[in-house]
Image: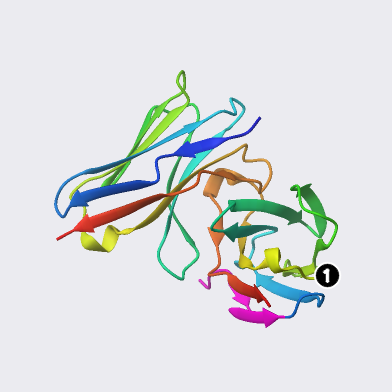
Amino acid sequence: KAGVTQTPRYLIKTRGQQVTLSCSPISGHRSVSWYQQTPGQGLQFLFEYFSETQRNKGNFPGRFSGRQFSNSRSEMNVSTLELGDSALYLCASSPGTGYYGYTFGSGTRLTVV
Amino acid sequence: GEDVEQSLFLSVREGDSSVINCTYTDSSSTYLYWYKQEPGAGLQLLTYIFSNMDMKQDQRLTVLLNKKDKHLSLRIADTQTGDSAIYFCAEGTGNTGKLIFGQGTTLQVKP
């Protein structure tokens, strides 16, 4: 069974640009969550989508947004990039509850220059 | 508020047992997870425990939960060099995909 797939693996963007990251969950999983990982702040929850609806949101500015499609694939978008947005962005999928745990992808490493 | 604390570093000899500790604050947490992260990789789910359990064993891994003290530990028996990684504990209610992670414990295994 295929795991969680995140694309691209690496990305370099310039300050002020915008970026879109993609996450394909495990087949049958309806929940996709996004996390930002930085050396200073650790792993921080961005938002979660379940059946195309945002179910929960972390404390990030409005520049960070996401969506989920009918096939459960999810995208997150960051507009007006700042240097501090450089991070590893991880997505996790689950059937819908924590009973089976959350399976993470390998992440997208975003570097803002 | 929600907070998860872990010690930052642990060094053991190959073949010894490793014990990684974690404390959490949210009493409404239903699930407590342990994840492993190797360099350049995502998070690998190792095991998890429900908050109404005291212990869970899974091959070389043993999770102990002290609900009164909100203390969680992960014991790795017969630690191998391949166990060298960062270990994260995380708490969640299970109803949403929001997990609160600790800072991670770097486990160094010396041959």
Give the image location of residue A106, x and y in percent.
53, 70
Residue at 61% x, 45% y is: B99
Magenta region includes residue A11: yes
Q: Is residue A99 above or below residue A30?
A: above
Query: In this view of the protein, which residue sits in the foreground, B35 or B110?
Result: B110
Q: Tag 1: residue type?
A: Ser
**Image quadrant in which you'd find residue A99:** top right
Chain letter belonging to callout 1: A
User: Does the segment drawn in magenta span residue A14?
Assistant: no
The residue closer to the viewer here, B108 or B51, is B108
Q: Is residue B84 above or below residue A20?
A: above
Q: Position of residue B107 (x, y in %)?
A: 31, 52
Looking at the rendered image, the quarter that the N terminus of chain B falls into is top right
Question: Which residue is under mark 1?
Answer: A79
Magenta residues, start to end: A1-13
Residue A48: x and y in percent read 73, 54
Identity of the residue drawn at 78% across and 70% down:
A81
The residue nearer to you, when weighing B83 against A36, is A36
Give the camera-side residue of B49 and B78: B78
In the rendered structure, the answer to whether residue B21 lies left or right of residue A63 reads: left
Q: Secondary structure at mark 1?
A: loop
Could you tell whether B82 is left or right of A74 in the image? Answer: left
Q: Quadrant of the C terminus of chain B?
A: bottom left
Binning the other alpha carbons within 10 Å of mark 1 as few (below 14), some (14 to 19) or many (20 upward) gives some
Q: Position of residue B93 (x, y in %)?
A: 62, 37
- Count of number-bearing discs: 1
